[in-house]
Amino acid sequence: MEIVAQAVGLFAVTNIDDILILSLFFAQGAGHRRTARNITFGQYLGFAGILAVAVAAAFGATFLPDGGDNIGVYVPVFALLILAEIW
């Protein structure tokens, strides 16, 4: 039950953040033509992108072996080391 409460809290916080950022976008575009349409289209396009990445990651996760070490923990660490040229 604790995880559900955390999920609800995070969802609420991200929605508050989204409302504030959208308010700034609408305020900045006040008086310009097609502002609402462009902002709405951007919202849908961004959500579709996030959804596509999440679906691809979920599909890719089905190919991971059950049990054992979780390679997903090590990939970001090695990527960071490679990018930082420490490895």
Image: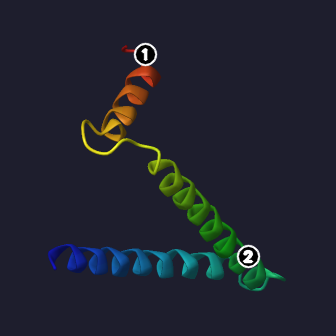
Q: Earlier in the sequence, mark 1 or mark 2?
A: 2
Q: Can you give x and y, in whole percent of width and height, for residue 2 in the image?
A: 15, 76
> Considering only vertical position in the picture, is 36 above or below 7?
below
Q: Secondary structure at mark 2?
A: helix
Q: Can you give x and y, in whole percent of width and height, for residue 72 in the image?
A: 36, 40
> Considering only vertical position in the picture, is 66 above or below 44?
above
Neighbour tally class for label 1: few under 14, some 14-19, many 20 plus, Cα within 10 Å: few
- The residue located at (69%, 80%) in the rendering is 40
Quarter holding residue 71: top left
> Considering only vertical position in the picture, is 83 above or below 1?
above
Three-letter code for the amino acid on which mark 2 is drawn: Phe
Q: How is the image coloured?
A: rainbow
Q: Quadrant of the C terminus?
A: top left
- The residue located at (56%, 82%) in the rendering is 23
Query: Which residue was labeled with disc 1?
Result: 85
- The residue located at (43%, 15%) in the rendering is 85
Left or right placement of residue 42 versus residue 68 in this view: right
Q: CA distance from mark 1 to mark 2?
A: 39 Å
Neighbour tally class for label 2: few under 14, some 14-19, many 20 plus, Cα within 10 Å: few
> Considering only vertical position in the picture, is 28 above or below 79?
below
Q: Secondary structure at mark 1?
A: loop
Residue nearest the observer in this picture, 17 or 87: 87
Q: Quadrant of the N terminus?
A: bottom left
- Residue 8 - label: none
Marks 1 and 2: CB-CB under 8 Å? Answer: no
Query: Which residue was labeled with disc 2?
Result: 41
Q: Can you give x and y, in whole percent of width and height, for residue 35 in the image?
A: 76, 80
Quarter holding residue 42: bottom right
Residue nearest the observer in this picture, 24 or 71: 71
Q: Can you give x and y, in whole percent of width and height, for residue 15 in the image?
A: 43, 80
Three-letter code for the amino acid on which mark 1 is drawn: Glu
